[in-house]
Amino acid sequence: MKHKNYKENFSLIWMNKRGQTSIFIIVAIVIFVAVLLVYFFYPNIKNVVSGEFSPSNEIENCLQSDLKENIVTLSNQGGYLDPEGFILYQNDKVKYLCYTSQYYLPCKVQQALIKKHFEDELNSVLKTKAETCISNLVAEFKRRGYEVSASSKVDTKVEIVPQRMEFTIMAPMSVTKENTQTYDEFKFNIPSEMYNILMISTSIIDFESTYGNSETNLYTQNYPNIKIDKAELDEGSTVYTVNEVTTKEKFRFASRSLAWPGGYGRETQ
């Protein structure tokens, strides 16, 4: 009986130790995983716990909505926020980028370097809004207990490059709490195919001003993601809409070139 009890007690002790070992292993695994999470995601965890924030993200969040809204307006109106010399088409004021009031003659380019003009128009929006966003950022730093030294001058820059639009806000400032951080500029990008769209539009305008018409099939053969709508209207006006089918971006502009009197349409070159 004693021998049997000894075996039973030994079995119980062994099982208890085995169970304790399993618990220790599980605890060790949990600690190890927690350490990995802290190591890889510490910046995000720190931001949540301490209430720190990213100035660049604050600026981007402040600006993006206005920028995207104005990009749509510029895209529908030939790159102008308040165009003159336009035709009303589908409730949009579509700027004539190539125009002649005469018949039988090719149009004259009304706006050279349309990409640069698009950038300049968008930059005017960026600059106006950026001043407010920088002011809000300074106020937020101060609310969090920082001492802030900031320049009163805010400069901005917009660049449309392949696959994106780049935005730069030059607003030097230094913020001090336990230590000092210095910021010279804030940058962010918006994914976009507007560069290719504007390059194709520029080429169409060149054809309009040289030959009086443009054959859009040439572009769609070389750019499979591009679709071009060409609406020929009265009095020789044509509205082009260059669409990027994957991103749903577009650029619309008008031309009046090689116009025929009496309602006759243009012949395709």
Image (cartoon, rainbow, N blue to C red):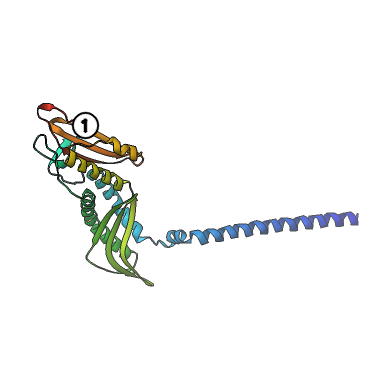
Compare residues 93 and 208 and report the one nearer the observer. 208
Residue at the image point whose x is 29% and y is 63% from the top: 138
Tally the marks. 1
Compare residues 21 and 231 and report the one nearer the observer. 231
Please identify the quadrant where the N terminus is shown: bottom right
Q: Going by the image, does 202 lie left or right of 57?
A: left
Compare residues 61 and 91 and report the one nearer the observer. 91
Compared to residue 9, the image places residue 210 above or below, namely above
Residue 172 in view of the camera: yes
SS at circle 1: loop
The percent position of residue 4, horizontal first and vertical second, equals 88, 54
Q: Going by the image, does 261 lie left or right of 163?
A: left
The percent position of residue 228, horizontal first and vertical second, equals 28, 36
The percent position of residue 233, horizontal first and vertical second, equals 17, 31
The percent position of residue 239, horizontal first and vertical second, equals 20, 36
Q: Going by the image, does 24 lie left or right of 181?
A: right
In the picture as drawn, the residue positioned furthest to the bottom comes out as 179
Residue 77 in view of the camera: no
Compared to residue 59, the image places residue 203 above or below, namely above
Residue at the image point whose x is 23% and y is 61% from the top: 155
Residue 168, located in which quarter of the rendered image? bottom left
Compare residues 202 and 37 and report the one nearer the observer. 202
Residue at label 1?
268
Question: Label 1 sits on what residue type?
Answer: Thr
Please identify the quadrant where the C terminus is shown: top left
